[in-house]
Image (cartoon, grey):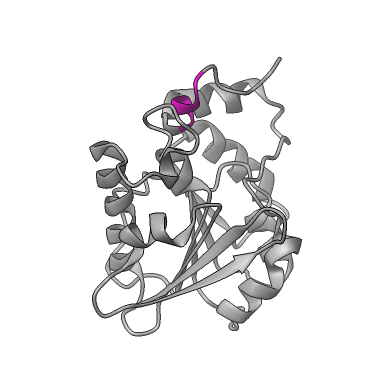
Amino acid sequence: MSNLPKKNEEYGTREYWDKRYEQEPEDATFDWFKKYADVAHLIHDAIPEKSAKILMLGCGNSTLSEDMYDNGYKNIVNIDYSPVVISQMSSRHRGRRPEMECKFMDIRDLQFEDGSFDVAVDKGTMDAMMTANGDVWASNKNDPPQRVVEDCTKEVNEVVRVLRKGSGTFLYLTFGQPHFRRRYLAREGASLEIKQIGDAFHYYLYILRT
């Protein structure tokens, strides 16, 4: 049975993801965009300290966390608003990756103290929220729905809040071009670096330093 939604806007709903994770095998994995091996060199440059405390935003059942953990980044906290996938991820990593944490949480309302993390990572999570009007390319339009603007702004505001001031880093991997994404990421007092990835089809790594 296909796990693709009937409408693209379902990507932005908890109901779709809960149902999908319930129907998939518990060892199933899915990664938006690039795999860790494709961007490891960029991540190493952005996170030189393997001891950094890392927040994985909307982890799903991606292998990004486990690949980073196995590569030495042991201090990772995964969050997702699907309790189904958080239960699955907790079971998957409990024995093999005991230092990794998995928590049920909404990226727009982070339940962490200010300045709790060195790094936050979003690989496709914000993009899923941008499918609100049914157009998978809506995130590349100049006039997104107000709900999209509010949700994405809340995410970035919360991320900036929980990152350590003066040394925090937010990594965001997406296909969204800079003139469409910059509006959500630009923050006073923070620097934004953008790296283009790929040849035929471009992805972008946004690096926001607080």
The stretch in magenta equals 7-11
Report which quarter residue 96 is drawn in. bottom right
On the question of residue 47 being in view, the answer is no
The residue under the point 62% across, 81% down is: 45
- Residue 186, horizontal then vertical, whole percent: 31, 68
Number of marks in the image? 0
- Residue 46, horizontal then vertical, whole percent: 56, 78
- Residue 35, horizontal then vertical, whole percent: 71, 55
| Quadrant position of the C terminus in the picture | bottom left
The residue under the point 49% across, 24% down is: 16
In this rendering, position of residue 83 left or right of residue 185: right
| Quadrant position of the N terminus in the picture | top right
Q: Is residue 180 magenta?
A: no
- Residue 141, horizontal then vertical, whole percent: 39, 44
On the question of residue 31 being in view, the answer is yes
Report which quarter residue 115 is drawn in. bottom left
The residue under the point 65% across, 77% down is: 44
Q: Nearer the viewer, residue 86 or 167?
A: 167
Q: Which of 134 and 63 is in front in this view?
A: 134
In this rendering, position of residue 64 left or right of residue 127: right
The residue under the point 58% across, 83% down is: 49
* Dominant SS type (magenta): helix
